[in-house]
Image (spheres, rainbow, N blue to C red):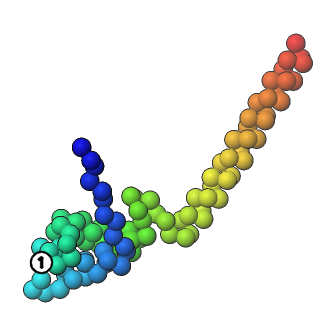
Amino acid sequence: MARKKHQHYTEEFRKEAVKRSEKPGVTQAQVAKELGVSAQQISNWKRQFTRLSDKQFNAVDGVDYSKQESEEVRKLKRENKRLREEMEFLKKVSAYFAKDQE
C-alpha cells in the first residue's frame, strides 16, 4: 500500500487561511473547502498561531528555524564537539601517564 504524501503549505498560505477563517460570517469549513484543505488543518494552524504567535510560522515539525535560534544551536553544537574532543584527548593522556606510573 502506498503512503499518502503530505502536502506542505507555505507560511504565507497558512497565515492567510487563518486570517480568512477569522473574518466575521465565515466558517473554517467554508475557507477549508475554498482552499482545498481540511477544516481541522485550519483549526490546527489557528491554534498554533495563537499559542506560539509568529514563532510557530518559523518552525517546521516543532523545530525553530529562525535565524537567531539556528545560529545559537550551531554555535552550541560546535562547542559541544570541541569539548568532547578535548575530553577524549584528556582520557587518552591520563591513561598513558597512569600506565607510565606502574
- Name the residue at 68% across, 52% down: 79
Q: Residue furthest front?
A: 1
- State the quadrant of the N terminus: top left
Q: Is residue 52 visible?
A: no
Residue 17: x, y in percent?
25, 78
Residue pointed to by mark 1: 30
Quarter of the figure with residue 32: bottom left
Q: Is residue 99 visible?
A: yes
Residue 6: x, y in percent?
30, 59
- Name the residue at 74% across, 35% down: 88
Residue 51: x, y in percent?
31, 68
- State the quadrant of the C terminus: top right
How many numbered marks are there?
Answer: 1
Relative to residue 5, is residue 59 depicted above or below?
below
- Name the residue at 41% across, 62% down: 60
**Left-right relation of 23 to 74:** left
**Left-right relation of 54 to 81:** left
Q: Residue furthest bottom?
A: 24
Residue 100: x, y in percent?
90, 18
Relative to residue 57, is residue 4 depicted above or below?
above
- SS category of the residue bearing label 1: helix
> In this view of the protein, which residue sits in the foreground, 72 or 9?
9
**Left-right relation of 47 to 77:** left
Mark 1 nearby-residue class (10 Å; few <14, some 14–19, many ≥20): some
Quarter of the figure with residue 40: bottom left
Relative to residue 26, is residue 72 depicted above or below?
above
Q: Residue furthest left?
A: 25
Q: Amino acid at mark 1?
A: Gln
- Name the residue at 21% across, 76% down: 35
Q: Residue furthest right?
A: 100
> In this view of the protein, which residue sits in the foreground, 7 or 25?
7
